[in-house]
Image: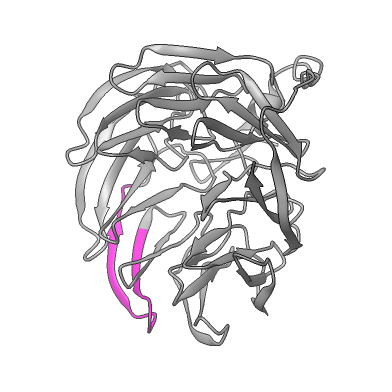
Amino acid sequence: MVKIASKVLVLGVVAAALVACSGNSRVRKPAELVEVKNQFDLQPVWSTSVGSSESFNFHPVVAGDSVYAASHRGNLAKIDLASGNKVWEVSVPERLAIGPGSDGRTTVAVTIKGNVYAYDDTGKALWNVNVGSEVLSEPVVAGGVVVIRALDNRFIGLDAQTGARKWNYQRQQSALSLRVGYGMLPINNEVIVTGFAGGRFGMIALANGGLIWETPVSFPKGFSEIERLNDVTAKPSMDGEILCAVSYQGRIGCGQARTGNLLWFKDFSSYTGTAQSSDLVFSANEKSHVFAFATKDGSQVWENTKLTFRDVGEPLAVGRVLLMGDAQGYVHAFAQANGEIVARIRHDSNPISAAPIAVGGLIIIQSQGGKIAAYSPK
């Protein structure tokens, strides 16, 4: 399951595979679910399927009044947000390892081989280009630019209408890094914030690909190469002027969005990332223990251990709850104030690794089996 090739650590789709390799399978036995009396309901509004993402982590994306989603086999669909009806569906010529990017005008899908296919808002093919490297990170379409993050540490800015290359930002190749997708957070159609190998994250300008700032969250430690891995792979989160990020086998920290200066950091490890409310940041560690920290100083507010080894996915903080899926297709709702599980639904029997999306009073969830559905909190 784990091998080292060309100085890059080749793992499964998520870093959990590394943890699973290292111990007795009985140690990783998922916790039994405790009964929950739902304090609110997530009522189904619509559901559809776009096809399986296999073992990959596909995110849907919402732009305007539509949801865009894809499958490993190359199905790419535009779905009406209100009704769940498919507005159009196309077949990308190659297989995908990541979900699409869209701004509602241009929708792009990037194949494993680094071919970028763009479509207009009617599903008509616009252009396709090759970026010369494997791509595992989801593209961002914002500010008239398509940002592609290649596995060879290049960030490539393409014109959204023509596919012409606008800029290229090259990062130095790390001696050892996780072979996974790195999340990119677009802000105000002006910048993206993303993590890097070696425990760092930074902000890049959409207009020209310039690095605005770069900040270390954590530093490599340990004796073996695997122990020293501490990449910031998950998409950073933002609320107001505060950004938070977490590294694998490293630290979690929050800081000022304008400068990247950290307010605090503390030892922590996660590959599923962070979510924020106005005063809290939430994250789950590799044991699927869910934590809340105060964004102002990093003090721990609560910890919930009831989902141990259930391989919870990326979090979403919305209203007064925190939503996270798990490997058996359940979606759990935690009270942000104290971490109590206050509701649970079964979305699917397949893993839910992508963060739910809150938009227009709906919660959008996609499982690895390809089921995508909208729920209304009641």
The residue range painted magenta reads: 155-172
* Between 8 and 188, the one nearer to me in the picture: 188
Residue 95: image quadrant is bottom right
Dominant SS in magenta: strand
Give the quadrant of the C terminus: top right
- Identify the image's colour scheme: rainbow, by chain, secondary structure or one colour: one colour
Q: Is residue 374 left or right of residue 127?
A: right
Please state the horizontal and vertical placement of residue 222, each as a whole percent of the image: 45, 16
Q: Nearer the viewer, residue 9 or 316?
A: 316
| Residue 148 on image: x %, y % | 42, 63
Q: Quadrant of the N terminus?
A: top right
Where residue 210 sits, quadrant-wise, is: bottom left
Asked whether the viewer can see residue 91, the reply is no
Q: Residue at x 70, y 26 (%)?
A: 20
Instruction: Report if residue 170 lies within the magenta region.
Output: yes
Residue at the front extreme of this rendering: 378
Q: How many marks?
A: 0
Rendering coords of residue 343 (x, y %): 68, 29
Can residue 50 be seen here?
yes
Q: Position of residue 165 (x, y in %)?
A: 32, 75
Q: Identify the residue at image location x=43%, y=55%.
A: 152
Residue 282 belongs to magenta span: no
Residue at image x 62%, y 58%? 97
Q: Residue at x 31, y 47 (%)?
A: 172
Describe residue 70's horizontal placement relative to residue 370 as left or right.
left
Front residue of this view, candidates 137 and 173: 137
